[in-house]
Image: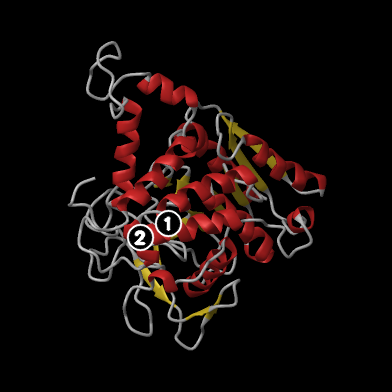
Amino acid sequence: MTAALPVTGAWRPGDPQGNRQFFTFPHDRPFALDTGVALHDVAIAYETWGRLDATASNAILVCHAWTGDSHAAGPAGRGHTSAGWWDDLIGPGKPLDTDRWFVVCSNVLGGCQGSTGPASPHPVDGLPCGSRFPVVTVRDMVRAQARLANHLGIDVWHSVIGGSMGGMQVLEWAITFPQRVRSIVPVATCAQATAQQIAWGAIGRRSIRLDPNWRGGDYYDAEPGEGPTEGLAVARMVAQVTFRSDNVFTDRFGRELADGSELNGRLDLWQRFEVERYLDHHGEKLIRRFDTNSYLAIGKAMDLHDVGRGRGGLRSAMARVKVPTLTMGIWSDMLYPSYQQRQIRDLLVEQGGRAEYVEIDSPHGHDAFLIEFDQVGPPIGRFIDEVAKG
């Protein structure tokens, strides 16, 4: 790590806005969370592509994953450190054709790219919320999106689509607001987090908690280079291993050392393999564009994800889904194995629903939904067209 690393990669008021738009909840309408805590003046950052038609019937909501944000499409530039994470899928003539569809993507509640989260000013003193920011759930995120939909004049989404944590939001939309969706596409996700998925998250949280520069979550006044960069980097490195497959790591890095030397001379405890350099790169990259507390908050929301919680169990909850569903899995996904997406399909079919499953043939593991656009895009485009035709 270098001294130049920022304390947080969160977007702050005064930073370049880019293509973000903002909706702030009315002050007299506090937002109640699952925990019972109420937030005031919640802001949601979002982006849109295309135009909403006269009947507001062509709207599609795209939901982002853990470290994603509202910039699902468009180039990198001022306010956006990288191109849109689904840029190949959203735009004129693309599977989510913006000549036809009005596409919306919002930064989730608890995020750090314009929506209210731990790095946001606390209404009492204007300082970053930090440790004062409460636990949020995927349901909280979805209910905040519902308020945004009201603001945009969208009563019903033609489809709600998303991968990984985005897929969790998709399922919650169909269960919490069954009358407000016409179809859903959950990709590389699950109906409830498993013990192993929670375990991966717990390791990342522990690495952050053990970083003395995390300071219990109140680190925003630290000098550059003195933030919780080591903890966040390790957490990201752990996650990055789960995002790809063993074959991809082996094919790309093998057993090569980072300095080009070979393992036939003097051995050193801290000699780095190429794969270690790759993980270091991804750790530092995240530090520059994300906030450590948001990483914790969103990761906890994913671990808490269980559509059956408080609804009589999994089957009872899934019985609320009444719309056509396309679920997609990845055969090499070790983080959200494809059996979890087939389970979603099976539960819906068992209860008389219309659901289909498509498997992505890729060695890239969980990240394939962000890589294999030629396999992800066409089924989605076909599905939303079929739903439109009835």
Q: Is residue 341 above or below residue 46?
A: above
Quarter of the rendering containing residue 260: top left
Residue picked out by circle 2: 214
Residue 312 percent across, percent down from the top left: 79, 61
Rendered residue at 51%/85% (across/down): 29
Left or right for 342, reference 328? right
The residue closer to the viewer here, 51 or 148, is: 148
Quarter of the rendering containing residue 55: bottom right
Residue picked out by circle 1: 209
Rendered residue at 75%/41% (across/down): 346
Amino acid tagged 1: Arg
Residue 215 percent across, percent down from the top left: 35, 64
Q: Secondary structure at mark 2?
A: helix
Q: Is residue 145 visible?
A: yes
The residue closer to the viewer here, 111 or 276, is: 276
Left or right for 286, reference 180? left
The residue closer to the viewer here, 57 or 267, is: 267
Mark 1 touching mark 2, by CB under 8 A? yes
Q: In 3D space, how far apart are the residues under numbered discs 1 and 2 (Cα atoms)?
A: 7 Å
Amino acid tagged 2: Trp
Q: Secondary structure at mark 1?
A: helix
For marks 1 and 2, the one nearer the N-term is 1
> How many numbered discs, if any?
2
